[in-house]
Image: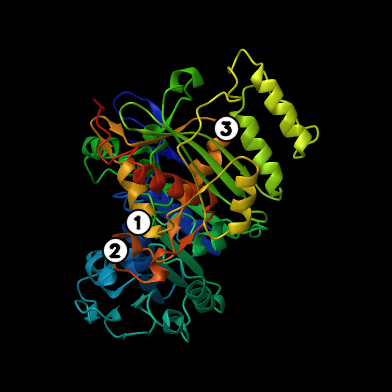
């Protein structure tokens, strides 16, 4: 494909013109950009780090260097904001191992052979410089890390026209020091990464501030790995096709869908969300519900049913803040009641309301006296910490069971049910408007400690802390653990004999 303008490219054989991303266009935009923050997002193998390193090398060498002059000429580029003279460039990686194994080799491959190195292959701060210069002087690149104790202090005291930060370190304090480093030279911050961490603190600070940053302060360019001429596009396409839709959003299109540190990374709406089923088809399915009390935070109630294969279905949900206990109890009764004999809200929750309800049910030909439209659940698993709320629910005809609150065991049980075995996952959520908050929480909930999900059951409390709304998720944990205790579900969800 030949570049026409912007992202427009033309096939030399068939003449078809397409919007395609390219490393050359990314470099062109960086050179001309007036933005303080230039963010080059790209999927895996899109050459975002390589393209960023080209910008870093040209800045270190200076626009007047013969090699840079030739590189610009061959690619039809203008120097734009490149400094004319050699400069110091700061190149950041999350760890020294990342720098040593990935970023330094890219810079090394682009720099002239005569450049010298210090600690090139060591897991520590490294530098490279042109002949006649030295570490930390104009005409050099200093490789630093962005994680660990006192990470922000490592970025203090240095001035540069360019910080090239490879991968999202998520640390706003480090970001501020990096911005301070470029401030007095009118420099720029260049970030190159695949957004596997979703909307990290750094990403929110740069791209999603509320109110947003000033117009022109941030420029974003996305690179598509399928457009990369340096790799096999067909092979890349097959690899991407093997992923979940969520993974593909991140690893091809660089969209902000968190992957790293997710509590349930296998959750996939294309697999785990199914069309709502007619209640009549579920009339004989055993039921189990879960609820998490709340007032300022939303109250969450989930209705669950287990199909003949042992697959747990989350049918509907109630997710409402700022409502009192009796109002929630009324709505749960109403959702489960026979509509033909339901007495309505008048006099709720006085004794005369109950008298009216029982009289109507006794003579109802639709429910034959049960007063219900759906089966009574085997259990309603609720947070045992709120004894007063549980007492009120029991007094109002909806007794609850003390939920098993073990967070790590509960997340593990959900994760196992999300696995696809025998052609089906063990847990599905119905595509009903009421379940939207649950689906959102499952897809976005992350561990506060991103390594928590990889560790053994013998963990400290902080490793089970999560980031994000978790009210519907708590109700789901209670429901799943109760369904397992009652042996309504298993991890293999095989057809029951």
Rendering coords of residue 248 (x, y %): 36, 41
Rendering coords of residue 425 (x, y %): 32, 35
Disc 2 to disc 1: CB gap under 8 Å: yes
Single out the residue that lies furthest toward the top: 365
Rendering coords of residue 20 (x, y %): 40, 38
User: Which is more toward the observer, 328 or 389?
Assistant: 389
Per the rendering, the mark at residue 219 is none
Per the rendering, the mark at residue 457 is 2
Per the rendering, the mark at residue 409 is 1
Q: How is the image coloured?
A: rainbow
Name above or below for residue 40 compared with residue 246: below
Report which residue position mark 3 lands on. Answer: 433
Name above or below for residue 52 compared with residue 184: above
User: Which is more toward the observer, 118 or 415?
Assistant: 415
Single out the residue that lies furthest toward the right: 347
Rendering coords of residue 39 (x, y %): 47, 57
Distance of label 2 from label 3 (alpha carbons): 35 Å
Choose mark 2 or mark 3, whichever is in front. Answer: 2
Name above or below for residue 170 compared with residue 114: above
């Amino acid at each position: 494909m030949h570049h026409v303008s912007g992202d427009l490219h033309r096939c030399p054989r068939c003449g078809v013109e397409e919007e395609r991303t390219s490393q050359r266009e990314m470099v062109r935009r960086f050179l001309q950009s007036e933005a303080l923050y230039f963010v080059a997002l790209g999927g895996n193998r899109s050459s975002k780090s390589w393209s960023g390193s080209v910008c870093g090398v040209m800045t270190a060498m200076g626009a007047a260097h013969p090699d840079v002059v030739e590189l610009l000429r061959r690619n039809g580029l203008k120097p734009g904001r490149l400094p004319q003279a050699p400069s110091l460039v700061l190149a950041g990686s999350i760890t020294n191992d990342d720098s040593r194994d990935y970023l330094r080799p890219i810079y090394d491959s682009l720099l002239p052979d005569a450049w010298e190195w210090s600690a090139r292959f060591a897991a520590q701060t490294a530098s490279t410089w042109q002949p006649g210069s030295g570490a930390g002087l104009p005409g050099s690149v200093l490789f630093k890390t962005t994680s660990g104790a006192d990470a922000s202090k490592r970025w203090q005291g240095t001035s540069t026209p360019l910080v090239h930060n490879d991968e999202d370190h998520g640390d706003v304090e480090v970001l501020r020091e990096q911005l301070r480093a470029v401030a007095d030279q009118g420099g720029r911050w260049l970030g190159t990464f695949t957004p596997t961490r979703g909307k990290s603190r750094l990403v929110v600070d740069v791209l999603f501030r509320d109110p947003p940053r000033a117009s022109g302060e941030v420029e974003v360019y996305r690179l598509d790995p399928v457009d990369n001429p340096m790799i096999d596009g067909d092979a890349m396409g097959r690899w991407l096709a093997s992923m979940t839709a969520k993974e593909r959003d991140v690893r091809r299109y660089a969209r902000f869908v968190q992957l790293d540190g997710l509590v349930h990374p296998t959750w996939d709406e294309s697999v785990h969300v199914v069309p709502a089923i007619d209640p009549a088809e579920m009339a004989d399915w055993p039921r189990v519900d879960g609820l998490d009390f709340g007032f300022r935070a939303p109250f969450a109630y989930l209705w669950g049913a287990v199909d003949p294969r042992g697959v747990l279905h989350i049918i509907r949900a109630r997710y409402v803040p700022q409502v009192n206990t009796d109002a929630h109890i009324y709505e749960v009764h109403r959702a489960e009641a026979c509509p033909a004999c339901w007495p309505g809200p008048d006099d709720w929750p006085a004794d005369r309301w109950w008298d009216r309800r029982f009289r109507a049910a006794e003579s109802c030909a639709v429910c034959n006296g049960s007063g219900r439209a759906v089966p009574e659940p085997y259990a309603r698993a609720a947070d045992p910490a709120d004894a007063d709320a549980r007492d009120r629910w029991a007094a109002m005809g909806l007794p609850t069971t003390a939920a098993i609150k073990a967070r790590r065991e509960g997340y593990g049980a959900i994760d196992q049910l999300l696995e696809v075995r025998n052609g089906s996952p063990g847990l599905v959520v119905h595509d009903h408007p009421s379940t939207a908050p649950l689906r959102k929480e499952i897809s976005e909930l992350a561990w506060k400690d991103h390594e928590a999900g990889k560790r053994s059951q013998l963990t400290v409390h902080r490793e089970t802390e999560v980031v994000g709304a978790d009210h519907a998720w708590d109700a789901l944990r209670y429901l799943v653990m109760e369904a397992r205790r009652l042996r309504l579900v298993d991890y293999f969800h095989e057809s029951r004999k």
